[in-house]
Amino acid sequence: MIVAVDVGNMNIIIGFFDGENLVNKCRLSTAVNDSAEEYAIKFNSIFEICKINTADIDGSVLSSVVPPLNRTISKALMLITGKMPIVVGPGVKTGLNIKINNPAELGADMVVGAVAGIAKYPCPQIIFDLGTATTASVIDKNGCFVGCAILCGVKTALNALASSTAQLPQIEIAAPENAIGTNTIDSMRSGTVFGTAAMIDGLIKRFESELGEKATVIVTGGLGRVIADNCESDIIVDRHLLIDGLRIIYEKNN
């Protein structure tokens, strides 16, 4: 069994794999100031909740968009499993051909998502990851990562809107019945859900125009389903894309 850990700006996703089978998946809040020992305590609690025996762990793999936590969480995993994790970055085999100006700039999350996308779905592909930031990765018909777009995340934008305006409240992200809102909450929901869906549809059209062909479109991230359900494009929702990518990278390096 292996442990796959995806460290995001707001949340840490922990997946347990028995072969290719995802046995369980849990979520922690990202805490930049926690020590390795504090994270080890949290991980140990997750293992107990998921009824995972540390003696059954063959290894672990880690990707992170929070560089200060790389060493901290690596040490925490070492304390719990007795083995240092594979950390996605320079020197780690991914099999991904990155054709951008500076491949070193590409975030580990986008690398992991692309590796999983290529393994699971036909190319060319467009992968949207709806997290703290929304990222759109473009993979050509030959399986090469050719570029991306990065924009404000759905919750990030909504939080900024509510905190910067005196009369707009914090709301639950859900689609209203109509695009034309007749009250404040439905108007905000329309802008958030339908506006994001329309933006994704628009980016897909632009990307496919530049690729010169139709692409497989995949959406992942916590809000993937609610946004994808309101897009006009044909979209695959894959909640486990990044965790699957980590498993694939672990296998490539063992």
Image (tube, rainbow, N blue to C red):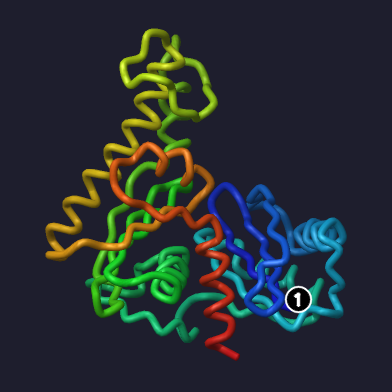
The vertical placement of 159 against 229, above or below, is: above
Could you say which quadrant of the image residue 182 lies in? top left
The vertical placement of 21 against 84, above or below, is: above
Instruction: Return the residue at label 1.
Output: 78
Could you say which quadrant of the image residue 230 lies in? top left
Residue in the picture at 78% in, 78% down: 57
Viewer-side residue, 224 vs 32: 224
Evaluate whether residue 150 shows in this view: yes
Mark 1: few, some, or many residues within 10 Å (few <14, many ≥20)?
Answer: some
Residue in the picture at 78% in, 61% down: 43
Q: Farthest residue in the bottom direction?
A: 254
Evaluate whether residue 111 shows in this view: no
* x and y, in percent, of residue 104 in the image: 36, 74
* x and y, in percent, of residue 123 in the image: 30, 72
Instruction: State the SS at label 1.
Output: helix
Viewer-side residue, 103 vs 176: 176
Left or right side of 205 for 165: right
Q: Quadrant of the N terminus?
A: bottom right
The vertical placement of 41 against 170, above or below, is: below
Residue in the picture at 22% in, 72% down: 101
* x and y, in percent, of residue 86 in the image: 60, 80
Left or right side of 74 for 120: left
Viewer-side residue, 144 vs 170: 144
Q: Quadrant of the C terminus?
A: bottom right
Q: Amino acid at mark 1?
A: Met
